[in-house]
Structures are given as C-alpha cells and as structure tokens.
Amino acid sequence: MGITIRTAVPAVSVILPFYNRTATLARCVDSVLAQTFADWELVAVDDASTDDSASIVESRRDARIRIIRHEVNRGAGAARDTAMQAAQGEYFALLDSDDEWLPRKLEAQLDALRRSGETAALSACRFEFIRDGRTITLPKPFDPSAWERSLHRECTFGFGTTLVIRRDVAERLGGFDPELPRHEDWDWILRAFEQGETLAFTPETHARVFCTAPPSLERFIPSSHRFLAKHDAGFAKFGADHRRRVIAYHFESIAGMAYEQRAYATGHRYLLRSFSTWPWRSPVPLAALPLGLVDALCGTRLIQRGANLRRALFGRQLDAEVA
C-alpha cells in the first residue's frame, strides 16, 4: 500500500533534467508516479529540447509535476541547478531522464536517512546498470569507511539517478560546475565528502541506469582533466603515491574509451601517460600499442575482442561512464 501523506511543502523534490528524450521519458516519469512514497514533487527542466519530450511529461496530468523550460541548451548540470532553485522539498532526489526507479526507492532511502539521525545527509542505493543487453548490479562490495578515497578513482554509485540529498547540504554545495560536460554529479558529490558529509547506503536494488550511448571524447577528455585539477589537493591528502595512482587510473580510462571509439592515437597517448605516471603495475595493457596499429590498419577490433585485455583496459571504464 502506498504512503499518501501530503503536506503543503513536499518532503522530496525530484530533480529531472531532460533534453530530447522522447524514447525514455515516459518510462522515467512513470517510475516516479509508481513510488510507494507519495509526498513528492517532480521539477522537470526541459533544457531546450527540439522534440516532443515536454509533451510526454505534460501528458502525465498530476498536480505534483512542474515543467520549467530553458530557452537555450545549457547542459544537465545547469538544468539541475534550475530545478533545485525552484524546488520546495526538504530533500532533493536526482533522476536522469533515460533511467528509472523501482517502486520503493524513495521510501527506502528516506528511511535510511531518517534512521541515521543527523549522521548522514546523503543517500544512494544499489542499482542495475544496463548496457548492450547486459545487466550488472552496482556498486560492488565496498568499504564504507573510505568513501572519499574510493570516489577519487571511480564513481559506481550512479548519483545522477540514485542520490537523495538533504536540501540544506545541496544548497551549501552550490551549483554544478558548468565547465564539466561530464563528471558533473561525481564532482558535486565528491565536494560533499571533502566537506565531511557522510552517506547512508541502501544495499537493495532500487533503480535502473541505462547506458544509451558512450560519451564523446570531446566531452570526456576535458571533463577528466578538469576533475583531476579540481580535486588534486584532495588526492594529495592521502599521499603522493595515492595521487599518482588516481591520475594514472583516469588516464587509463581515457585510453580505454579512445580505443573503443577507434581513436587509436589518442588511446596510445593516454595509455603511455598513464604508465609514465604510475609504471609499477602489470604491463598487460601495453599490448594495446601493437594491437591498436593492427586494428587501425585492418579495421579489426583485436583490443576489444581480447577478453583479458578488455578486462585490463575497460574494467574500470564502466565506472567512468556511470558517472
């Protein structure tokens, strides 16, 4: 039975940016309508869509849904900022327009936050990550005492769809970085941990995150560099070796994405930068250097098809894509 408590001010404001999402918005919005916790508002920001996305949201005739429109496309971070500025709830719950929630998502995470008392101001849940017909459950087992340090290297929490955050903490963090076309939610949450916030994790699966298309290198590479520059002092706080490992890790993620998109020169460059930053590890990924030459000349995909190399080169890339 659903919880139907209503107040003048909603408990939760669902923050939903969208841009040209006619293929996924119905599923996304309907998953909010299906929540067992009903004391929410949905603040949907149309980031200057050129298709019929807005009409899909409008067709769900529910007084809890509001649409705000941008006249020009400003990006997901700016759209979330607009939604948060207009939101009224005590908590903000982020949702990406190509994803969906399972029915008990808000109920479970709000319960986790309230049971934590004043200890936690943020919550995330386990989720299904779906790509190319393959589904895996994330995040994998982790050490909850090392949130900040683990977020330096990877972000397997799907914060754009799993995060619930107390309003006052979100306001204290300020807006999303407009110069980050990727990693903007990852950067935002890492700032919270750098300020000493903690997270109440819900181990049950309550969301589905869909990888509809890999990010372009033109967006991914500058975002990675800006992310590294912004948090360099935070990396160094855990020691010089940790800092070098983190930088090498991100360079290897760029290399893996470049190889997948057949940008072999870029892949080689970042793979070598990764090893020059932290050379004390398995040399297996360096096999991509000769294999990339064969792939480039013959149109093959030896790098991707080699199971062991794929694990070495792309095992961590999934984390970057989720972020």
Image: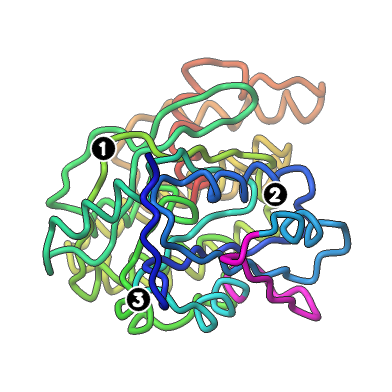
Magenta region, residue range: 62-78
Amino acid carrying mark 1 in the image: Pro
Viewer-side residue, 21 vs 280: 21
Task: For residue 241, say whether it is visible.
Answer: no
Residue 167's label in the rendered image is 3
Q: Classify 10 Å Cα crowding around label 3: few (below 14), some (14-19), many (20 and above).
A: many
Q: Can you say whether 179 is above or below 290 in the image?
A: below
Q: Can you say whether 260 is above or below 181 in the image?
A: above
Closer to the N terminus: mark 2 or mark 1? 2
Q: Residue at x 79, y 49 (%)?
A: 22
Residue located beneath label 1 in the image: 203
Viewer-side residue, 150 vs 137: 137
Q: Position of residue 300 (x, y in %)?
A: 76, 20
Q: Residue at x 34, y 74 (%)?
A: 90
Residue located beneath label 2 in the image: 25
> Quick one: SS at disc 1?
strand
Q: Residue at x 40, y 39 (%)?
A: 206
The CA span between labels 1 and 3 is 23 Å
